[in-house]
Amino acid sequence: MFENRIILNAVIAGMMAAFVFFLFDVIFDLRDNFSEGISYSIDEAIHLVFESGAVLALFFGMVSLFKYNSFLRDQNVKAQTQLSALKLDFDEYVRNQFSKWELTVAEKDVALLLLRGLNTSDIADLRSVSVGTIKVQAHKIFGKSGVSSRVEFMALFMDEFIDIGISK
């Protein structure tokens, strides 16, 4: 993210430098020819038209880039806000489901770790219990939630999370 910002700022700085260079070149060409009363040759007029076009293209390019960058920042803020709201909704849904299923405190801890994708031995290590204990608790959790496997258990919550996201 930081590298992208550096690159974007470098591109904008380059566009600004080119804009200023071509703008002053056009201004000085016009000033010199008008002050001396010299008319442009066809080659000079074409050169001036292309430089003027470059000035306009750079100006509108910078304006568009600034507007688009601002739009992307706004979209990012909106997405972050929506993600935070979804996370709160999802956390509340998880807590409500655990209460509805009447999980014990230990089962709630194990269920959360299952949802995070930890395997049985890692959960046992974290909780300082045997793998057998975690298997029994997982089996009870699956029974209370009406599923028969870890995949089905996780799918219960993923489906709900997707439904919450769609309804926002």
Image (cartoon, grey):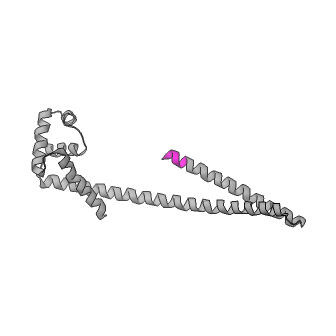
**In the foreground, 107 or 18:** 18
**In the foreground, 114 or 129:** 114
* Res 140 → quadrant: top left
Q: Which residues are magenta?
A: 1-6
Q: Is residue 167 left or right of residue 149?
A: right
Q: How many marks?
A: 0
* Res 96 → quadrant: bottom left
Query: Does the magenta segment cover residue 131?
Result: no
Q: Residue at x 52, y 48 (%)?
A: 4
Principal secondary structure, stretch drawn in magenta? helix
Q: Quadrant of the C terminus?
A: bottom left
The percent coordinates of residue 113 (x first, y second) are 22, 42
Q: Is residue 125 left or right of residue 78?
A: left
The percent coordinates of residue 106 (x first, y second) are 14, 42
Q: Is residue 134 above or below residue 148?
A: above
Q: Is residue 22 left or right of residue 112?
A: right
Q: Is residue 131 left or right of residue 61?
A: left
* Res 122 → quadrant: top left
Q: Residue at x 56, y 47 (%)?
A: 7
**In the foreground, 45 or 124:** 45
The percent coordinates of residue 16 (x first, y second) are 66, 55
Q: Residue at x 69, y 60 (%)?
A: 54
Q: Is residue 110 above or below residue 91?
A: above
The percent coordinates of residue 102 (x first, y second) are 10, 51
